[in-house]
Image (cartoon, rainbow, N blue to C red):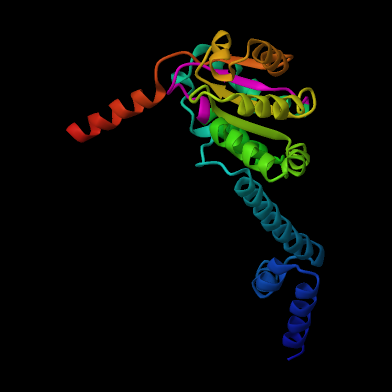
Amino acid sequence: MAINCYMSEVKDYAQYLKLNVIKSDIEESVSDAENNNLSYEEFLCRLLQKEIDIRKYNLTQSRIKIAQFPYKKYLEDIDLTALPDDARSKFKQLSSLNFIKEGQNVILSGNPGTGKSHIAIGLGIKACIEGYKVLFATVPLFITQLKELKSARSLRTFQNKLAKYDLVILDEFGYISSDREGAELLFTNISIRTGQKSIILTTNLAFDRWNEILGDPVMTAALTDRLTHKSYVINMNGNSYRLKETKAWLKTLDK
């Protein structure tokens, strides 16, 4: 009877302190401690560790959700043998995420289907797991959002929020041309992160063709200079990774 009374009090205390895991698992944890003859210290350590582990997991899932990835891709799922040589040789270095600590950028440039977005999202998810705050957006949608915020006179608030992200991933630069206003907004919001916080940019265009998207040679030169300064520029030209997967899938249908 006394034990049940204490158990009720423990649950009340756990609820008051917002220790939800302890509240829900206390009975199981006590039973485990009794069955395994755990010391008080070990019992308490395991109980608190379980609370911390769940909190860390929930925080990680929250960061991944806030990042707005279009889908989940992990670095562990990448077939390194299928990557272009330059990406394969720098993969370990990028995976360390030291570029985020140093506020450096990563530019993944090459033809479609070679793994640019997979690498970018994989790095982003790993960054979320390691505690970094990440934001993902395609360049066309990012520009549209900037225009809408400017019209609503909320751009400065967004810029302050953007500055707090440790890593911003801008995917698909070069697929759709931008007008003058969009190009200027993109340039401004990339420039304010230069040398402070990291950007990963994926593009299917070589640098000498960026003017086709921005429409201003001076702005293009300035943006290229800012993005590439002390950055990792990865040559992603190679055989299509997606085409290889499609061919392999079609073979399974023939069997």
Decide: is 177 above or below 225. below
Q: Quadrant of residue 169?
A: top right
Magenta run includes residue 126: no
22 or 109, nearer to the observer: 109
- Outermost residue, bottom direction? 1
Decide: is 113 above or below 165. above
- Outermost residue, top direction? 208
| Quadrant (top left, top right, bottom left, bottom right) of the C terminus | top left
Q: Position of residue 123 (x, y in %)?
A: 61, 32
Magenta span: helix, strand or loop, mainly?
A: loop
181 or 161, nearer to the observer: 181
Q: Position of residue 187 (x, y in %)?
A: 68, 24
Decide: is 21 above or below 196. below
Q: Is residue 121 visible?
A: yes
Magenta run includes residue 112: yes
57 or 117, nearer to the observer: 117
Task: Report the number of discs.
Answer: 0
Image point (74%, 83%), residue name: 8
Image point (24%, 33%), residue name: 252
Q: Is residue 97 visible?
A: no
Image point (45%, 21%), residue name: 114
Q: Position of residue 150 (x, y in %)?
A: 69, 39
Boundaries of the magenta span: 102-117
| Quadrant (top left, top right, bottom left, bottom right) of the N terminus | bottom right
Image point (74%, 81%), residue name: 7
217 or 170, nearer to the observer: 217
Q: Position of residue 53 (x, y in %)?
A: 69, 54
Whether residue 91 sits left or right of residue 191 in the image: it is: left
Q: Quadrant of residue 250?
A: top left
